Amino acid sequence: MSSFAFATPASVADAVALLSDAGDTRCQMLAGGTDVLVQLKSLDRTPRTIVDIKALPETNALDIGSDQIYIGAAIPSAVLNENAELKALLPGLLEAADLIGSTQIQGRASIGGNLCNASPAGDSIPALIANGAVCVIAGPSGQRELAAEDFVVGVGKNALDKGELLLGLRIPKPTSNTGDAYLRFIPRTEMDIAVAGCGVRVDVDGNGVCTAARVAIGAVAPTALLVPDAAAALIGSKLDDDALAAAGAACSAAASPISDKRGTVEYRQKVVGVLCRRAAAIARDRARG
């Protein structure tokens, strides 16, 4: 039987010290635990220290400021979805979070944990990237920040160095002319992982012209991808069918999926383009109020 240790640091400084002093001992964060507990019961049963960060104030803080929103890495998705102000500001992100598991799972699962788990099909990751999220990371040298699109570096791998942990995410606060959306395709009606996913955020002016856009795709490459060409196709347009089609084509071109029993390369490339068009249309309508 494998051996495991369990630690509950009382502060961020304690957590960083514990991680830094672990030596060759493997440490794994427990923010929500919905991925970690499954891994412990499956093939990945190697010894490790589980570091519970659920009680740290910095990982549980939710602050909606005048210019930005801070979401702690350990806040359950269900808690986020109960916040009416946050749901009105970031409906696409919260819809993505609401797709992760069942109602029971969402009572513990967090978008911070979903990001750190670094699955190519993680639903919250394209939505975070589309919303310009910045990761707030604590480590031995203090705090640093990293764009969400740079946080996942491979399948199941993130950019955290030894001694570091994710505290939370900073997201630019949307204006009244901002809209976001996330869509995914799954073979079943629910409780499945994405064959393809797409997150879109747009800003429009008083004439309905797109002044800013971010588009991200998931489950069609080793990591979720920011697609600048898709955003460029939207900016300067009135987000009409031609612009949406061009953005969709850019997403299909940026995708580099694999073929498996859930979909071929060609199928996933086509589906992610369709999802981009549909998500951009939803974001446009939300931006227009």
Image (cartoon, helix red, strand yellow):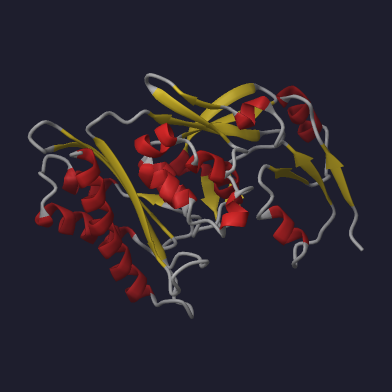
Image position of 176 (left or right of 51): left
Judge by depth and name the residue closer to the eye, 282 or 252: 282
Residue 215 visible in image: no
Task: Work out which residue is located at the far left of the displayed protein and give it.
Answer: 207
> Which residue is painted at 40% across and 51% down in the image?
225
State the image quarter where residue 220 is shown. bottom left
Q: Is residue 37 above or below residue 64?
A: below
Judge by depth and name the residue closer to the eye, 75 or 210: 75
Task: Work out which residue is located at the far top of the displayed protein and give it.
Answer: 66
> Which residue is painted at 65% across and 37% down in the image?
161
* The N terminus lies in quadrant: bottom right
Q: Position of residue 261 (x, y in %)?
A: 48, 80
Q: Position of residue 4 (x, y in %)?
A: 87, 51
Image position of 115 (left or right of 208): right
State the image quarter where residue 52 is shown. top right
Could you tell me how many numbered marks the image carries? Answer: 0
Residue 233 visible in image: yes
Q: Is residue 107 above or below residue 272?
A: above
> Which residue is painted at 59% across and 43% down in the image?
76
> Which residue is painted at 25% across and 58% down in the image?
278
Task: Work out which residue is located at the far bottom of the displayed protein and give it.
Answer: 261
Q: Is residue 142 above or below residue 261?
A: above
Image position of 146 (left or right of 250): right
Q: Position of residue 237 (x, y in %)?
A: 10, 44
